[in-house]
Amino acid sequence: VQLQASGGGLVQPGGSLRLSCAASGIIFSRYNMGWYRRAPEKQREFVAGMTTDGNTNYVDSVKGRFTISRDNAKNTVYLQMDSLKPEDTAVYYCRATLFRSTYWGQGTQVTVSS
């Protein structure tokens, strides 16, 4: 099983990025997908999640700015991040869950700075 996250980078405050997480080795459509992040000197936190039937939820700090989506034909989950703030700076990880099975991607760095 592999979850390959990409799309991170350096962006100015107010800018946008789209993260992608491509899955292999799992039946992607059966997995609930999520994005998490770990900021420097902080614990990893939930950012956004999407169930197999398309329900979404977000941490309050990103509501209205981030959008999670998935393309089951491409085995990929996305995180569109708009109006980025310096406090969004973190390593972002994708996660796939199905009952007791959980898989994590390797993380992609997002830095929001002027």
Image (cartoon, rainbow, N blue to C red):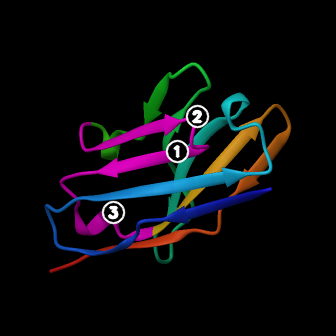
Residue at (30% x, 65% y) in the render: 87
In primary-sequence order, the first of circles 2 and 3 is 2
- In which quarter of the view is residue 112 placed? bottom left
Residue position for label 3: 88
Type of the residue with mark 1: Val
Above or below, 88 against 30 in this view is below
Crowd around label 2: few <14 · some 14–19 · many ≥20 (10 Å): some
Q: Which residues are magenta?
A: 64-90
Discs 2/1, front? 2
Crowd around label 1: few <14 · some 14–19 · many ≥20 (10 Å): many
Q: Secondary structure at mark 1?
A: strand
Side (left or right) of 51 relative to 17: right
Above or below, 43 against 51 in this view is below
Q: Are marks 2 and 1 in contact (CB under 8 Å)?
A: no
Residue position for label 2: 72
Residue at (55% x, 55% y) in the render: 21
Type of the residue with mark 3: Asp
| Quadrant showing the N terminus | bottom right
Side (left or right) of 37 relative to 22: left
- In which quarter of the view is residue 101 placed? top right
Q: Are marks 2 and 3 in contact (CB under 8 Å)?
A: no
